[in-house]
Image (spheres, helix red, strand yellow):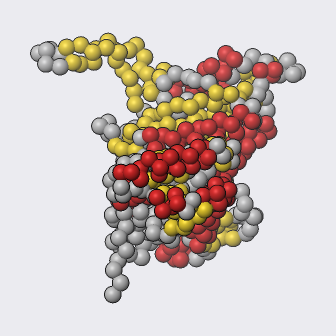
Amino acid sequence: MSKPIKTAITPTREADYPEWYQQVVKASDLAERSPVRGCMVIKPWGYALWENIQALLNKKFRATGVKNAYFPLFIPLSFMEKEAAHVEGFAKECAVVTHHRLEPNADKTGLVPAGALSEPLVIRPTSETIIGDSFSKWVTSYRDLPLLINQWANVVRWEMRTRIFLRTSEFLWQEGHTAHADSKEALERTTRMLDIYADLAENYLAVPVLRGRKSDSEKFPGAVETLCIEAMMQDRKALQMGTSHFLGQNFAKASGIKFQSVLEKEEFAWTTSWGVSTRLIGGLIMAHGDDDGIILPPRIASSHVVLLPIFRKPEEQAPVMDYINQLAQALQAQSYHGIPIQVEIDTRDIGGTRNWEWIKKGIPLRLEIGPRDMAADSVFMARRDKQPHEKTSLKRSDFLTQITSILDEMQEALLEKARKNLSDHTKEIDDPKAFYDFFTPEDTEKPEIHGGFAQCHWCGSASCEAKIKEDLSVTIRCIPFDNPPENGQCIGCGQDSKERVVFAKAY
Ligand SMILES: [Zn+2]
């Protein structure tokens, strides 16, 4: 009988996927729970990932003319009320500030809020209304358009059930807001920013995505159209990784964003908004993690290589460290897709734990270097996407010339694996019974594991969509751009349909 393989994470994905996720986050040193319910502390290893995402997006946004700015955390309640659908959509998640001072309580044992505000302030769940107020002052003529602004910020949405990175009451994000003279240009901007998100997901995070639009009931509150990218996690559930909204003139009318047109007519602007959040990190964990921890795709990794010196006698230490420091310098002098190779050196004398910590943290390459490797002028390399014990001895010079292609190979392998997961668990389904079976877990002990993405015909009716949601907790994730027009019968009611949409359970 073969012994079960011991894994660094308990439970395994197979045994209990949701619990595996919590344990992986903990073991990987990315983030931890905070004393404030539903909030998280992002640790340096996790924050470095966010900074890499920021750097990448800033570069891509700037290339399309977008500039960064910053707007207040507080939004007057009256601003939120200006757009009816918007306030209705966010009302249940709003955190509200009503006081501005603390005073001793009656028996002097503690403090109580005093100094009620004349108007309550909402802590931004999103910033359309407060940014719209600024835009209304900045835009007077067609010459002021397009106005292309992004802000990096935290937002608060009071969530009842939270999961670190995926759904937290406070999270970090970027929100882009643009104003245009006509709808065509605003629609083009909406698609263009979605394409940037798709590029980030696929080419950097190595997560393949479906690009499409949302059904009316899944739209952003107040939007005319919401475009999205949707990815499949290893448990076959969908994760919305980014959205881009065409807001029409709804918010321009609510905030008074008006301009004099070329024909000297007063017109309302057409606006867009688009965002991605720290949720992307949750997606990265769930798309690539294994039973030993997370696996960081090299193009977004917090760091690329860790050098682990090995010496058994004290006199070996100095020469090994010299060799390692020189190697680190040679690596840092090289660039990987325009970024200097990031190197960690871990000199802690803690035995095998050291190697396993780096496995759990998902660093792409681990190099063990001892006196024997030094004598042979070589390195002993392990790749995080391979088995933990699979190691290769390479000449130092070969390693230095090959490292960027090794990292690219790993990046490609992760994307391929995720693509396979997506295609293996996406099915075209036309029979209603097969549809219900697809989303019914085979194993009642593992309610999380079901079919995946179902490409089905849908008549377009919201009540039909609601019934499926009610029955199966399955929603329309997107109406993919790539689906060709095709006549068929709605999976819910049998009425005529002109295209397939993607149904799935979602985070
Ligand atoms: Zn229907």
Q: Residue furthest bottom?
A: 1
Q: Residue at x 88, y 21 (%)?
A: 263
State the image quarter where residue 455 is shown. Answer: bottom right
Describe residue 471's horizontal placement relative to residue 429 as left or right. left
Q: In this rendered view, identify the residue nearer to me: 309 or 336.
A: 309
Q: Residue 300's x, y, as percent? A: 58, 48
In the depicted structure, whether residue 68 falls above or below residue 450: above
Which percent across, then down, holds residue 133?
Answer: 61, 20
Identity of the residue drawn at 77% across and 25% down? 145
Name the image quarter holding residue 21.
bottom left
Give coordinates of residue 135: x percent, y percent. 66, 21
Q: Is residue 67 visible?
A: yes
Q: Quadrant of the N terminus?
A: bottom left
In front here: 45 or 53?
Answer: 45
Question: Image point 75% across, 35% down: which residue?
Answer: 64
Q: Which residue lies furthest to the right in this view?
A: 263
Residue in the image at 71% along x and 63% along y: 483
- Is 416 above or below relative to 317? below
Name the residue nearer the viewer: 134 or 249: 134
Task: Check the image and name the residue furthest to the left.
Answer: 107
Residue 170 percent location from the top left of the image: 43, 36
Nearer to the camera, 234 or 205: 205
Instruction: Work out whether residue 81 can be spotted.
Output: no
Judge left or right: residue 132 versus residue 349: right
From what the image shows, is residue 35 above or below residue 331?
above
Q: In which quarter of the image is residue 460?
A: bottom right
Left or right: residue 354 versus residue 474 is: left
